[in-house]
Image (cartoon, rainbow, N blue to C red):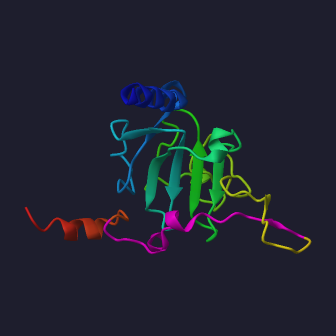
Amino acid sequence: MQYLVAITLITAILSLICPLEAIKCFECFDTGPTNKECTKEKSCTGAACLIFEDANNVTSSAFCLLTTEHVALNKVSAGCWLEPDGKSKHCVCFTDFCNKLRDKTQPEESNDGPLSSPLKDLGMLKHNPFLDYEYLDPEDKGEDRLHARPAPTNILFPSALEEDVKVAGHSASDEQGNTTN
């Protein structure tokens, strides 16, 4: 009997994760600044594809977003947004392999402005679509109870604020790292 209940439960969970709705994305880290090694062989499957471009104009990452409440409810629009530093950018898109990283060694007119989108088909959004700017804080007793909901502390990465020379794509650090054969 327990075996039948376990199979039924697993089947129900798997039916919620519909593979037909999954999106194939590039999953590339440490391929910059040319990103030529970011190929379809380096991929993942998720609910959305994302890109991160650091303000240093070298570090780029492509990855999958597994799912969030906002994506599941179709509340997220495809587009790019600036990070709080006003220079780094994130993009989210919803078609197979839409998060292709651009070659940062090839200057293009569309790439030189702070409001240029890393993906030519996407525009810049006014804010991060994953933040709920209409969240009512039940603890706030003031008249204006609208607050952006902060990201949970278990997913914040304070070390990401500092550049890691081992993965930033600098050729000098690559040469230093190849001293053993």
Measured from the top left, where is residue 155 in percent x and y? 51, 63
**x 65%, y 56%: residue:** 81
Q: Is residue 131 left or right of residue 120?
A: right
Residue 95 is at least partly visible in this image: yes
**144, 41: nearer the viewer:** 144
Q: Is residue 165 left or right of residue 118?
A: left
Measured from the top left, where is residue 113 in percent x and y? 63, 60
Residue 104 is at least partly visible in this image: no
- Which corner quadrant holds the N terminus? top left
**65, 68: nearer the viewer:** 68
Q: Is residue 49 left or right of residue 84?
A: left
**125, 132: nearer the viewer:** 132
Question: Does 135 lie within the magenta span?
Answer: no
**120, 124: nearer the viewer:** 124
Question: Does 157 lie within the magenta span?
Answer: yes
> Farthest residue in the front direction?
1
Write down the region rendered in magenta.
144-166
Quadrant in the picture for residue 178 = bottom left
> Farthest residue in the right direction?
143
**x 40%, y 45%: residue:** 27
* Main SS of residues in magenta: loop
- Which corner quadrant holds the C terminus? bottom left
Measured from the top left, where is residue 108 in percent x and y? 54, 51
Q: Is residue 117 above or below residue 165?
A: above
Quadrant in the picture for residue 43 = top left
Q: How many marks?
A: 0
Measured from the top left, where is residue 163 in percent x and y? 42, 72
